Image (cartoon, rainbow, N blue to C red):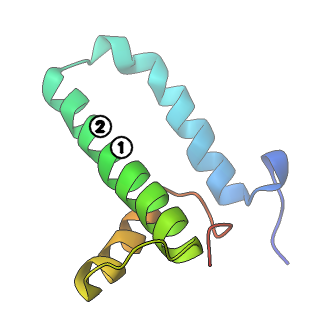
Amino acid sequence: MQEKGLLGQKMELSGVVLAMHGLCVFAPLSFNWSAFWVAVVLYVVTGLFGITLSFHRNLAHRSFKLPKLLEYLFPYFGVQAMQGTQWTG
């Protein structure tokens, strides 16, 4: 049995989320534009392509057809968003 942490999530994930929010305190001290653009690209890849396009529109609704390579690649991007398993179709 797994230990539950904040909001019913696993303790490991709770630690990662708390660490990320704690490290945000240092963001104004270490800002640079290249890191900003990396964050934007990762958001587009994981959030838009992984979660919205792949998990929701393709796997949940089958609303369009993708080439096999993208059908397997986009869900991998969604997993990188650390949303958990609630999106499994």
Measured Cα–Cα span from mark 2 to mark 1: 6 Å
Q: Is residue 47 above or below residue 12?
A: above
Camera-nearest residue between 20 and 51 = 51
Residue 34 coordinates in the image, percent (x, y): 14, 29
Observer able to see residue 80: no
Q: Left or right: where does residue 12 sit relative to residue 1? A: left
Instruction: Residue under label 2, please give it.
Output: 39
Observer able to see residue 75: yes
Camera-nearest residue between 49 and 64 = 64
- Snapshot quadrant of residue 64: bottom left
Q: Which mark is residue 56?
A: none
- Snapshot quadrant of residue 10: bottom right
Q: Marks 2 and 1: which is nearer the front?
A: 1
Q: Residue at x 31, y 53 (%)?
A: 45
Q: Left or right: where does residue 16 sit relative to residue 45? A: right
Q: Secondary structure at mark 1?
A: helix
Three-letter amino acid code of the residue under disc 1: Tyr
Residue 61 coordinates in the image, percent (x, y): 57, 72
Q: Secondary structure at mark 2?
A: helix
Q: Residue at x 46, y 72 (%)?
A: 58
Residue 69 coordinates in the image, percent (x, y): 24, 84
Asked if marks 2 and 1 touch (Cβ < 8 Å), the reply is yes
Q: Residue at x 30, y 76 (%)?
A: 73
Residue 30 coordinates in the image, percent (x, y): 27, 18
Residue furthest out toward the left: 34
Instruction: Residue under label 1, please give it.
Output: 43
Residue furthest out toward the top: 28
Q: Is residue 50 above or below residue 73?
A: above
Three-letter amino acid code of the residue under disc 2: Ala
Residue furthest out toward the front: 63
Camera-nearest residue between 5 and 64 = 64
